[in-house]
Image: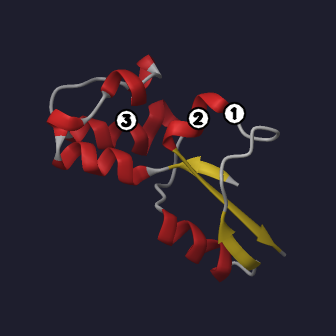
Amino acid sequence: MCVPNARIYIEAYLNPEKFESEKYCLYQPAYNYNSPIDYINYIAYMAGHHCHMFDQKNLLAILQNIGYSKVELRDFDPTIDLEARKHESIYAEAKK
């Protein structure tokens, strides 16, 4: 499983001067910057494509709560994951 890491954008809200929007806010239809809260809006809504925000802890907890076992974070795998999303994603593996 691969999902966007919301923590990146929350940290951008807290420390906007350190955030690289040109690296993380690539989907222009969803990016409308007026203030740091818009970094969170970007990842939360993604122009209607996103419905939930994840960090490492809640992703694993959600998978466990819906009945998956052996739930664990994993590293990027170039054979199944998109290189273009590597910098902003959380990767997990779970077995039912």
Q: Which residue is farthest top?
A: 28
User: Picture coordinates of residue 17 (x, y %)?
Assistant: 15, 34
Within-10-Å neighbours for mark 1: few <14, some 14–19, many 20+? few
Element on which disc 2 rests = helix
Q: Nearer the viewer, residue 67 or 92?
A: 92
- Say if 39 sits above or below 72 in the image: above
CA distance separating discs 2 and 1: 6 Å
Answer with mark 3 or mark 2, whichever residue precedes in sequence: 3
Element on which disc 1 rests = loop
Residue that mark 2 sits on: 85
Mark 1: amino acid: Leu
Element on which disc 3 rests = helix
- Say if 60 sits above or below 14 in the image: below
Please indicate whether residue 53 sits to the left or right of residue 3 in the image.
Answer: left
Mark 2: amino acid: Arg
CA distance separating discs 1 and 3: 20 Å
Q: Which label was assigned to residue 42?
A: 3
Query: What's the residue at 35%, 21% (across, down)?
Result: 22
Please indicate whether residue 75 sits to the left or right of residue 94 in the image.
Answer: left
Task: Please give the count of numbered marks on the rendered protein.
Answer: 3
Residue that mark 1 sits on: 82
Answer with mark 1 or mark 3, whichever residue precedes in sequence: 3
Q: Nearer the viewer, residue 30 or 90?
A: 90
